[in-house]
Amino acid sequence: MGTGGEDASGDGEAGEPAAGAAPRTAPRDETRGSDTVFEEGAAADEAGDNPASAHDRGRAEDADPNRLRRRRYWSHGLAVCTIAFGGLDCVSTDLALRLEGAVEANPVVRALQERLGAAWIWPKMALHGVLAAIVLAHPTRETLLTLGLIAALTLGAALSNLMLHQELLTAMAEQARLFARWIFGAAPAAAG
C-alpha cells in the first residue's frame, strides 16, 4: 500500500489509483497512532449505509455517560425485579400446588420438586440470582432486553398462579357460603 504521493499500483507516480486498487492511505498521523484511509465511499458513511460506520456510531453512543447511567439504572431495576418476580413465582407456585388437582406444568421444576421437596425453591432462586448478576455485570442492550423478557415471563407465570389460586379460593368461598346458608337457613326454618 503506498503512502503520500504514490498511487496504489505501486509504480511510484502520483496520480489516480489503478482500477480495483486498494484505497490510498494518508501519511501516518503521529498524534493518533494510526493510518488514515481515504475511501471513495465517504457518502455511504455519511448516509449510514456502511455497516462499519454504523458499528463505530454504536460505540460512540455506548460511550455517552448519560446512556451508560441509564443502562446502570435499568440493570439494577431489572436485577431487583428478576429476584422479586422469581420469589413471587415460587410462593404463588407453592400456593397453587396446595390446591386439589393442581400440577406443575414446567417439567424441570416438577423434577426439582420431586427430588428436593420443599427445597426446590433454592435452585430456582439461585438461577434468578445468577441472571441478576449477569445483567449487573454486563448491562448491554441485549442482556437488558433478554432479562426484561425473562422477568416479564416470570411475572406472568406468578400472576397466572395467583389468579388460579384466587379463582379456586373464590369458588371455595362461594361453596362455603352456600353450605352455610343451607345449614343455617335450614335450621331456623325447622325450628319455626
Image: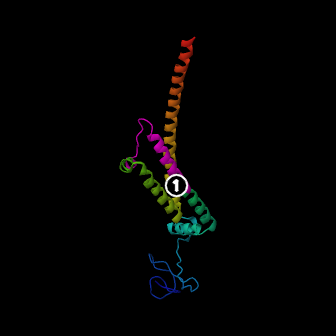
Q: Which residue is mark 1?
A: 83
| Colour approach in the figure | rainbow
Instruction: Indicate whether 177 appears above or below 141.
Output: above
Magenta stretch bounds: 80-109
Residue 51 picture location, percent across and down: 50, 66
Nearest the viewer among 180 and 39 is 180
Whether residue 51 is situated above or below residue 36 in the rendered picture: above
Q: Amino acid at mark 1?
A: Ile
Can residue 152 be seen by looking at this rendering?
no
User: Is residue 15 found inside the magenta-colored segment of the image?
Assistant: no
The reply to whether the magenta stretch includes residue 98 is yes
Is 57 or 134 nearer to us in this picture? 134
Q: Is residue 84 in view?
A: yes
Q: Position of residue 182 (x, y in %)?
A: 52, 19
Find the residue positioned furthest to the top.
Answer: 192
The spot of residue 46 in percent (x, y) is 58, 67
Q: Name above or below for residue 136 compared with residue 191.
A: below
Looking at the magenta stretch, what is its main secondary structure?
helix
* Residue at 51% across, 38% down: 163
